[in-house]
Image: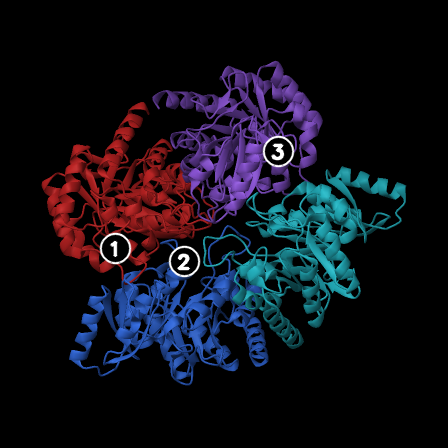
Chain colours: A blue, B cyan, C purple, D red
Amino acid sequence: MIIQLESKIKTKDKQLILKSIAAINHKPTEVKTQAGNYLVCIGKADFDIRLIGSLPGVLDVHRVSESYKLVSKKWKVGYSHVDLGGGIKIGAAQKTIMAGPCSIESEEQVEKIVTHLKLNGIKVMRGGVFKPRSSPYAFRGLGIDGLKMFYRICKKNGIKIITEVMQVSQIKEMYDYVDVFQVGARNSQNFNLLDELGKVDKSILLKRGMSGTIDELLQSAEYVFSNGNEKLILCERGIRTYENAYRNTFDINAIAVLKEKSHLPVIADPSHGIGVREHVAAIGLASLIAGADGVIYEVHQCPEEAASDGQQTLNFDESAAFVKKINLLTNYN
Amino acid sequence: MIIQLESKIKTKDKQLILKSIAAINHKPTEVKTQAGNYLVCIGKADFDIRLIGSLPGVLDVHRVSESYKLVSKKWKVGYSHVDLGGGIKIGAAQKTIMAGPCSIESEEQVEKIVTHLKLNGIKVMRGGVFKPRSSPYAFRGLGIDGLKMFYRICKKNGIKIITEVMQVSQIKEMYDYVDVFQVGARNSQNFNLLDELGKVDKSILLKRGMSGTIDELLQSAEYVFSNGNEKLILCERGIRTYENAYRNTFDINAIAVLKEKSHLPVIADPSHGIGVREHVAAIGLASLIAGADGVIYEVHQCPEEAASDGQQTLNFDESAAFVKKINLLTNYN
Amino acid sequence: MIIQLESKIKTKDKQLILKSIAAINHKPTEVKTQAGNYLVCIGKADFDIRLIGSLPGVLDVHRVSESYKLVSKKWKVGYSHVDLGGGIKIGAAQKTIMAGPCSIESEEQVEKIVTHLKLNGIKVMRGGVFKPRSSPYAFRGLGIDGLKMFYRICKKNGIKIITEVMQVSQIKEMYDYVDVFQVGARNSQNFNLLDELGKVDKSILLKRGMSGTIDELLQSAEYVFSNGNEKLILCERGIRTYENAYRNTFDINAIAVLKEKSHLPVIADPSHGIGVREHVAAIGLASLIAGADGVIYEVHQCPEEAASDGQQTLNFDESAAFVKKINLLTNYN
Amino acid sequence: MIIQLESKIKTKDKQLILKSIAAINHKPTEVKTQAGNYLVCIGKADFDIRLIGSLPGVLDVHRVSESYKLVSKKWKVGYSHVDLGGGIKIGAAQKTIMAGPCSIESEEQVEKIVTHLKLNGIKVMRGGVFKPRSSPYAFRGLGIDGLKMFYRICKKNGIKIITEVMQVSQIKEMYDYVDVFQVGARNSQNFNLLDELGKVDKSILLKRGMSGTIDELLQSAEYVFSNGNEKLILCERGIRTYENAYRNTFDINAIAVLKEKSHLPVIADPSHGIGVREHVAAIGLASLIAGADGVIYEVHQCPEEAASDGQQTLNFDESAAFVKKINLLTNYN
């Protein structure tokens, strides 16, 4: 059960509500986000929901039987969106395009890609500075100095940035240089990280785990939301299956089902979803038709020389053609 | 290596070619289909392909390194299509829609659905009379009498039919009452059945196995083709993964990759691909955007009362809305 | 519900029972096997089982809620076993060892392997003459003549044989030359084949599908049993997963769980289960500890030259060492 | 390539070695662990390994082509083991048994279980105080105070403890109260955590990820080792597959293959591996036969009332019976 409270609820009203919750043997968690004030109640006993609904200080009350609560669509009228400022709203009417290299490599690289993005009307740039790599001997990214450079150039050009955060201690040092914190597939159930990201007022894009279920993704999102941060975006990026004709198996079903189960925006990552450059656009377009609120993909001035993920990275021509198709599709829709 | 032979090749020319193949230690398989005359040669030794290409009786010669040969796109200019007559061509410019119930249940049912199909411009009806069921105690279909009834009504109405064949002995009795033989997921590697279907002059729709790879699907198709039947359609219907929020995981990557690797038409089955009625249209549209040549889906006058697969079957309103969206999308494309 | 009937039940008694079943809205299937006489009843209505149990002609009656019935352990006291004659009982106290090549290749080969088996006390030889191969251009086995030769040599030496049957039409021609029909992983849900194998009085070893569930395997076994054949053996041979460090992932859990859920004997196939020669013995021994009634593995006088599956086939020394370890383990147990 | 250096190598000798590595275009990483002094060199160029081997200060040099290096078996004679003190050596001749509850719940609980362990000769107790839970609303463990209590009771009784660490910041506060740090499946690719655990002189048990590959597990272990910590234990705990008859699919193949590829000790976790109490012993014994150096399993004075994982937790009688079987098997072996 989710109880929406009045923003300026009186202490004694809240106490009465908590008492009533205790009376039906439910365990409440108080959640205060940028947008609301909630009591999430977990319990098994059956009860008359109107008893709670009629208490002073209660705006509304909803039964949510799923293991995730606040990210469920059951209690919200319509979908939520995340506002990055500058007119960029993820999950609103417009489809959002985010693009950029796997890894930030140099100032020159960022500038070239920014120019490409601006030419094609793309307003959010992706790029990693802390890279999770299977091998300890692989390139691990430019780190915090790379981030500052990346952010500086983008800000100057009116581009928002999204970049991966890998651990709690990085949140603070990255905070001023990030528009969207990305949580990668390997950290999809790093609950301490999710807890802390729930305590900052910054947008979060949460990727599905490598073999994460829909349910686990939504519960991970619940970690962030229930710690106080509603600025949440879900991301489908392909799952691990027996098929090895491609890097991952993009789960198009997940797009449709996440939009049914949650009010949060859903972004598709076709680059990781198929891992083959030639097919990134096809999978991206399919995701949008299936209901995704946008795409995030990899682009590089010279994919063959990219520090990582070159085989799934578009060059500028391919990227421009993809954007053109997205715009055509969006207008049709 | 695939050698295309002249249709009226002289015996002595063929003998010279076979001798040349033996000389480079390749093993030839002679294939004669409705459309062509081929020698498929398997071997490891390196050789000068022009030596073969210049022999009398040879139309063309192509290296194909994949384990599948004749179904590969490497040797064909453009895509092939399957002509069902009556202007219905699968794999040609038009997207093809096939729809119908999981199981044929009664004359009344078939007539109701035929009326719905005609109203919506759908020209191919699906419907099973031999049903593969996990349990021996479940409904196994109306059998050959059901097929005759199904075919009779459809023929009268100018509708082509597609229905599943489960074993070699059924081919002959079904032959006169079928436009397209469907090979189900469970029979995707029933090689004896594939061999025999290669010997008849009737279209075949081959479904990917429940956990079949792209490569296995194409090799299964090669069984049919190399036995002499080019009238082949591939079908992606979802694969088995760890995720159980849906019946299967529709593999949208497969659509794009099959169209890259093979010249055969590819049809998407979103009904089995997700198994949830609400999302069949979304997945179907996504498949078309990703390159599928058409869709096959389940529709029933009253899904709640269907003998099987009700939870993934559209009702008439949902089906009509889906068709409308397909037409819109096709015109945009 | 399973009703065990007296072997010489009177017609009028049976009619009364069928009437009583109809009265509780259950659908009966009559099953007559080598060992028993059953009515398998499917239905949802609740009823007093004693009403059925007290009818004349009824030996016993059992509720079985699973989708599979006759293969369930719920209605049987103890485990069943399959008697091949000559003192060879699969599923009885002794662990059974079956070994032989992937494919029967020549008279000389069979004789060499038979000698090896006899030296090591192995009494059942495996060997394929009809080979299911992914590619139509691969070696497909010696066929029925090979089988006759294989059977003749083995019979002369007191060795029983197990070999794969791929389609209905082969059953009759193979019948006289087979001790155990093997149903391969690709045919695990070839229901027509299972139906027909249920009608013959010959032992059947049923392999789990490549990505078959425990439940599907037991339902496939139910096809055979409910058609009249109790001489059934289940076989775990590894499943398809994302891991590609080995050919398949041997599912050791399945061994323990099948012995919990079914009364049928369970055999492990470590050769396909891991697909790497060096580890076949380790996986085989683990299976026996986990409860398997025996193992089936591949052995060849010269694995490097085997027509198929060489990389997972033991040579004679490895095979002898494996048998020695099995005997040691069996004595410990 | 791994170069083992003399422990007191002279600066000028090391400089010459580094120069020689640069000359063949390899990138060296210096690794100093409790036991050795290494240079791990990554590069593609071919070279004469003897040139390196003959340099002063070099103890030995080995080619290791895998993506993991120091954890590979290729450069080590024999297997390594981890010494916990008090005669407890993991990976040495004796099989190691670790047992305890999923979660530490109370002083009384710990004392009851410690008594059980001592009675059965078990010298390592598991128990979580920081619990990774899918839902933010679930019990997350007693935290650091619980750990201190847990450690105090065990130390008094001569029992070593193993417990999960979830994030970098916990390492320091847990350090004095832990004998083995466990890295859970969800953190198997939490590279920052692995980096930091490589810098402490304490044993680490690293679990395979939920759908982690063998290769990824070994590369994660390489993170720890290459940061300076050789006290490493690998753990197979079941993987995620399509089968849902059990919680996970225990990958018995992994046991055999990890012992082939790495010199590190391998422990099996049958509790999570199958997730069904009745079969934990069968899977545990199978693991030992397949080569595991020990088992870790869940036991509780009253599994039905356990705070978590009750369905896969043994009671004292089941646990005692399991230990008895392990001892019997070990003596046979």
In the drawing, does residue B54 fall left or right of residue A154? right
Residue B316 vs B81, above or below: the answer is below
Name the disc covering residue D164, or none: none
* D269 or D195, nearer to the observer: D269
Report in which chain the residue with disc 1 lies: D
Q: Position of residue B327 (x, y in %)?
A: 66, 74
Q: Position of residue D129 (x, y in %)?
A: 20, 53
Q: Could you confirm whether marks 3 and 1 are on the same chain? A: no
How far apart in space, not on screen, are marks 3 and 1 (Cα)?
52 Å
> Alpha-carbon neighbours of circle 1 within 10 Å: few (<14), some, or many (≥20)?
many
Name the disc covering residue C197, or none: 3
- Looking at the image, can residue C150 be seen? yes
* A12 or A144, nearer to the observer: A12
Which residue type does callout 1 highlight?
Lys
Marks 3, 1: nearer the viewer: 3
* D87 or B229, nearer to the observer: B229
Describe the element under mark 2 as helix, strand or loop. loop
Describe the element under mark 3 as helix, strand or loop. helix
* D203 or B212, nearer to the observer: B212
Splitting the image into 4 quarters, where does residue D191 fall? bottom left
Q: Residue at x 52, y 33 (%)?
A: C312
Marks 2, 3: nearer the viewer: 3
Residue C153 vs A193, above or below: the answer is above
Which residue type does callout 2 highlight?
Gly
- Looking at the image, can residue C106 be seen? no
In the drawing, does residue C78 fall left or right of residue C237? left
Q: Which residue is mark 1?
A: D131
Instruction: Locate the C terminus of chain B by quadrant.
Output: bottom right
Splitting the image into 4 quarters, where does residue A230 fall? bottom left
Q: Which residue is mark 2?
A: A212
Report in which chain the residue with disc 2 lies: A
